[in-house]
Image (cartoon, rainbow, N blue to C red):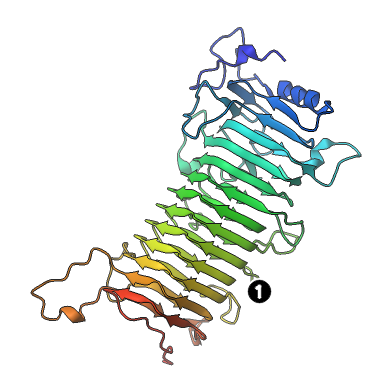
Amino acid sequence: MDVLPYLQRPAEWPFSADPDVDDSCTVDDSPAIAKAIECAASLSTLRRTVYFPAGRYVVRTPIRPHYDRLTLTGPELSADAVSGDPDTATLVAVPCNPEQFPGVIQIDAALRGDNTTPEVINEVWIRNFQVALTDGPRSNANSGIRVNRCSSCLVENVIMRYEPLVEERPSCKPSNLDGITFSLGSGGTIRNVIVDGVPKGGIYLSSNPAVHGTPSIEVENCELKNINGPVGATALKIISANATVRNCEIHHNQLHPASGSAINGGHGIQIFTQAPPNAPVSVPADIRIENTYFHHNAGSGVVLASATPGYVPTGIRFYRVKSAYNKYHGVHIQAGTDVEMKDVWAWGNGAFGMYLTAKSNLPASTFRIGDVILEDPLVFNNNLLSGSGPNSPGIRIQASDVTVLGGEVAVCNYENDENDENEEDEVLGKSVQQMCWRTGPEEETLFYPVGNVVSGVITTTTSEPEIADCPYD
């Protein structure tokens, strides 16, 4: 295909300034790209490649690389590339139907449309692209890059930005547009990816373990930022199983709800159960988060949750994770079992550094949290929204079967008054605090945490841990 006339489109507009090339908004490079993919697929080589020269490609309907061992790639892409960099290949999504075709690439074995459709597609690699999303769905959820039924797939060296043709407020962005989604049993790797400004979620691992196979997924060296639409606006969402996240930075994500809508969102990561209509509950399991930094999010840095009685995330591991300067909690565990957090730091957050609470609108007898280990946590200088004080704990536990081993809970930048004779009695905040709560319509039932153990915690200008029984009053 002769694509040379289209490769010099200016960054400020997805179409050419040359009316001899494209003089209206009906220009579409999708058919030419589809023909190039069919040509590559006809080759007998072990791996087929479609190379995109540097330039801007207008995609009206998503590219559908539904062939095994197929690579789509542009020129080598640096993480420092700015929007519209003429030396990069940019895929500009200008969807003809934002509800059905909002993004640039959709991988799905079902899209082959023949009688030989395999259960999965194998080894499709997407590399070295900038992606500009200009619109998206408000009813039917979809993504800029969506990977369905794909084994050993790779999304690598991609910079994805939400760049509408007409400037719009965050609360008016498409409410159901995610960045990159691995779904329907897909596995593989998402590596060296930046997602910036997408409304609903930066990366969404959404396979249902109860329905699909759960091949491993690795997310590494990614940056997810400025996710800021009207629904969710959480950078990394996981309802799948067998996933590892490492060496990522997730920051400055904020929910902008429309008037009267739900306000839960703006988190760094949310690992949660989901109950889809007419399908088994999707329960995330065997999730590992390593060496990742969650900061400056307008929700909490880390959230484990479930709104479905009897189903909670399980087998969750956090190692060497930092959560700082988030508006609410550094770590907020609302539901989970077999959870281990080792060398997790939480500082400078607006609410508690770590908050474990089984309290919810579900019945008090509903199992939500159990077998949680916090080993060597470092929790300091939190509760900045309300200010540190005697009732502001670093770690608050409203759950059972929680163990805190070692670590340090502190208030930083604390200066004693040399003239204060009661200096030894002055304590800013509690270290570890256990609490119970009332529930039921008349608040007559108490939930009593049991089986909690705290040992070896170093307290610096905070109280000794409090693990006393809750009073019956």
Q: Residue at x 53, y 44 (%)?
A: 199
| Vertical placement of residue 464 versus 236, above or below | below
Tell me if 229 is positioned left or right of 185 in this view: left
Rendered location of residue 242, percent (x, y): 67, 59
- For the residue pair 236 and 71, the one nearer the viewer reads as 71
Residue 83 seen: yes
Furthest toward the bottom, the residue is: 472
Rendered location of residue 142, percent (x, y): 65, 43
Label 1 packing within 10 angstroms: few (<14), some (14-19), many (20+): few
- For the residue pair 67 and 173, the one nearer the viewer reads as 67
Instruction: Please state which amino acid type lies under the numbered disc 1.
Output: Gly
State which quadrant residue 410 falls in. bottom left
Task: Identify the image quadrant of the C terminus.
Answer: bottom left
Residue under numbered circle 1: 310
Tell me if 433 is positioned left or right of 281 in this view: left
| Vertical placement of residue 271 versus 405, above or below | above
State which quadrant residue 434 falls in. bottom left
Rendered location of residue 39, percent (x, y): 80, 23
Rendered location of residue 55, percent (x, y): 58, 20
| Vertical placement of residue 379 versus 391, above or below | above
Task: Identify the image quadrant of the N terminus.
Answer: top right
Q: Secondary structure at mark 1?
A: loop
Furthest toward the right, the residue is: 115
Q: Residue at x 76, y 26 (%)?
A: 37
Furthest toward the left, the residue is: 419
Furthest toward the top, the residue is: 20
Residue 437 seen: no
